[in-house]
Image: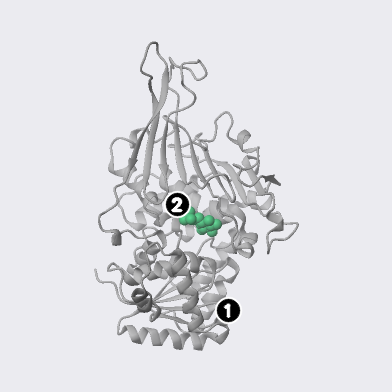
Amino acid sequence: DRIEPHVVVLFGATGDLAKRKLLPGMFHLALSSLAPAIEIVGTSLEEISSEEFRELAHSACDEFSRLPLTEEQWEFFASKIHYVSQAAGPEALATAVRAAQQRLGEGARLLHYTSVPPKAALAVVHMLEKADLVANSRIIMEKPFGTDLASAVALNAELHETFDESQIFRIDHFLGKEPAQNILAIRFANGLFEPIWNRNFIDHVQIDIPETLGLDRRAAFYESTGAYKDMVVTHLFQVLAFMAMEAPTALEPRAISEEKNKVFRSMLPIDPAKVVRGQYIGYKDEPGVSPDSDTETFIALQCEIDNWRWAGVPFYLRTGKRLAEGQRIISIAFKEPPKSMFPIGSGLGVKGPDHLTFDLADAAKMSLSFYGKRPGPGMKLDKISMQFAMQETDNAGDILEAYERLILDAMKGDRTLFTTSEGIERLWEVSEALIEDPPPVRTYAQGSWGPNAIHQLVAPNAWRLPF
Ligand code: BG6
């Protein structure tokens, strides 16, 4: 179906996400045959000119674009970019947006993108209302959608005073990643996996997203969130829902959200006693960080989904900054056979469970590791691994990065990979005890796997990483 031309109104246009992902992403979309004609009106609190904003966008695309940038392509994209400071007020914004809309011609729609910290989100909504830019528009809201249950409920209520739910797209870019969608394909397109996808066969699941990255220039944002709100309550729980949900009645937005929300409703409240919060040594000296900051740069926790499929199966989640490796894996550990002839520790080679592992790296990969006989005399076993990698299509232009895919989906009005207010509020609800009574942060060395307490958290099991 033809997608109407779009003016993208980008709030937080000079921020880190805009530079790293959104501007390079829109550059690709502007050149892609999959996307409609677009114009971009950037805005933020900074008072810079359109020319200065183009320079900022140019260096962002130079640094972060995954495709080489030719002069001709840049000139084309630059002609689509405009900037107006939020300080200039709603009329100035309206004038710039209407002008861009006229250049695109009749039928051009508006897509607002709020790439701003949680506490600034409502100011954006109010500005759009005052600028009369709400009708016939859609709005993409960036995570973490509030900072606790009360603020999420208030944000949703206020949003609904201006925007209809059908206009609101709550983005979680992990769901735009090819490998995350591949979880649905693998689970629901095959007969092989579903029969064993439950508490009878699965011992525990790990969702492990360590990062080597530090704060970059995001201290202010990070100080207001920390690892739990930045990553877990958003990305890790969304991925967990894809892993744990029942088969939806159809591959369509409502059916998928219903199943995901059932998972969230079945989640037991996070127990602070089953959480390890960490802070890397040196964090307090980072520019912009308070010297007595209690913000966690690392979190590991156990959660449980108390339903027929998963009761009693621990889900271990971990993520953090400045860790030993950058990885994004989901690992399923299978139960030991009912009567093992090769008990763990018997010297026959079995060291732990067999695993199915999803790698959420850019190209979807999966591996199945299990025991087989080592060739030679006697009966000694080795762990062997079968690897699967999704073949990339011949047409590189068809592969969209997560944000590009989701921005395009929002332009189409396709909500399949977006989250709902109900799901988000429930996730804040299960987080309440932890937010109110967080365990103390423990320090960890940069380049490590987190504080030592992570091992007790999963005992008698072990972390799958490092491989
Ligand atoms: C963002 C978080 O949403 O996701 C960052 O704010 C994090 O802190 C990033 O680094 C990770 O995303 P990706 O796609 O690079 O794995």
Closer to the camera in the image, 436 or 362 = 362
Judging from the image, the colouring scheme is: one colour
The image's mark for residue 308 is: none
Closer to the camera in the image, 379 or 146 = 379
Is 237 located above or below residue 370 in the figure?
below
Relative to 257, is 46 on the left or the right? right
Closer to the camera in the image, 407 or 434 = 407
Is 354 located above or below residue 93 in the figure?
above
Q: Is residue 166 visible?
A: no
Secondary structure under tag 2 reads helix
Residue picked out by circle 1: 46
- Disc 2 marks a residue whose amino acid type is Asn
Q: Residue at x 46, y 58 (%)?
A: 172
The image position of residue 388, as x and y in percent, is 33, 40
Image quarter of the N terminus: bottom left
Secondary structure under tag 1 reads loop
Asked whether disc 1 touches disc 2, contact meaning CB atoms under 8 Å apart, the reply is no
How far apart are the two marked residues, 1 and 2, measured between alpha carbons? 38 Å
The image position of residue 330, as x and y in percent, is 45, 42
The image position of residue 378, as x and y in percent, is 40, 11
The image position of residue 339, as x and y in percent, is 43, 16
Disc nearest the viewer among 1 and 2: 1
Q: Earlier in the sequence, mark 1 or mark 2?
A: 1
- Disc 1 marks a residue whose amino acid type is Glu
Please, which residue is most extreme toward the front here? 71
The image's mark for residue 261 is: 2
